[in-house]
Image (spheres, rainbow, N blue to C red):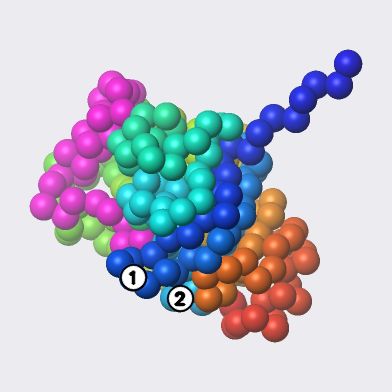
Amino acid sequence: MTMPEAPPILELRNLRAGYGPIEVVHGVDLAVASGSVMALLGPNGGGKTTMLNVCAGTLAASSGEVRFEGTAVTRTSADDRARRGVCTVPEGRGIFPNLSVRENLLMATQVGIPMDRIEEVAFSQFPQLSGRRKQMAGTLSGGEQQMLALARAFATDPKILLLDELSMGLAPIVVGQLYEKVRQLAEAGLSILLVEQFARTALPIADSAAVVLQGVIAHRGSPAEMEEALSTSYLGA
């Protein structure tokens, strides 16, 4: 007997969203397969971050549906989605600069994971943060701040990780180090939906990709199939 196909871990159905009277996302359908990495690519202002915010629950959809593990979560809060396993690393890192590294990690206990477990995971993934537990997060370098944001996310044992512009404002060598950590998690089976303006930074770890232009998905396919689409849509290098 053939087993039924598992639902996508995250799915958008005819999603519309925006800010006040301005609609930014226009009827998007999107599915992230469980255990896969999907990259949302495209220039700034296209609607990528808006879609990610709706997935995270920090922005309400105007219409349409968001489903997580086959269940509609369109009207559930960001906190509820976090407890279900939806973890977000927002654009701009989302750390608390006036709190220490350890105090930033303490925020992750809100999903019910003990602090000792969070520290164990965080510092094993990013050992250089271990000696800076008492240092104010705002005094870290940009790369270290992004490491802290990722460490806090990894430590919550998410089912899906939503990453927004991981490379923003960072040196290429640092971006490479961060994406290597993300690649390792992906290879271990974590589902990831990432937004990235610089497409060729994200494509090497992606299983599928979509180009978002003016609030709609203009192209979608495998990373290899995206090369021509990127050349004709925007400069994603």
Tell me the residue at 86%/21% (across/down).
Answer: 2
Tell me the residue at 18%/51% (across/down).
Answer: 96
| Residue 69: percent from left, percent from top | 56, 32
| Residue 211: percent from left, percent from top | 62, 68
Q: Quadrant of residue 218?
A: bottom right
Residue 197 visible at all: no
Quadrant of the drawing holding the N terminus = top right
Circle 2 residue: 44
Q: Nearer the viewer, residue 4 or 203?
A: 4
Q: Which residues are magenta?
A: 91-117
Tell me the residue at 50%/44% (across/down).
Answer: 66
Quadrant of the drawing holding the C terminus = bottom right
Q: Report the amino acid beneath label 1.
A: Pro
Q: Nearer the viewer, residue 134 or 145?
A: 145
User: Mark 1 falls on what kind of element?
Assistant: loop
Q: Report the amino acid beneath label 2.
A: Asn
Q: CA distance from mark 2 to mark 1?
A: 20 Å
The single residue placed furthest to the right in the displayed view is 1
Circle 1 residue: 21
Magenta-span inclusion, residue 109: yes
Tell me the residue at 45%/37% (across/down).
Answer: 73
Q: Quadrant of residue 118?
A: top left
The single residue placed furthest to the top in the displayed view is 1
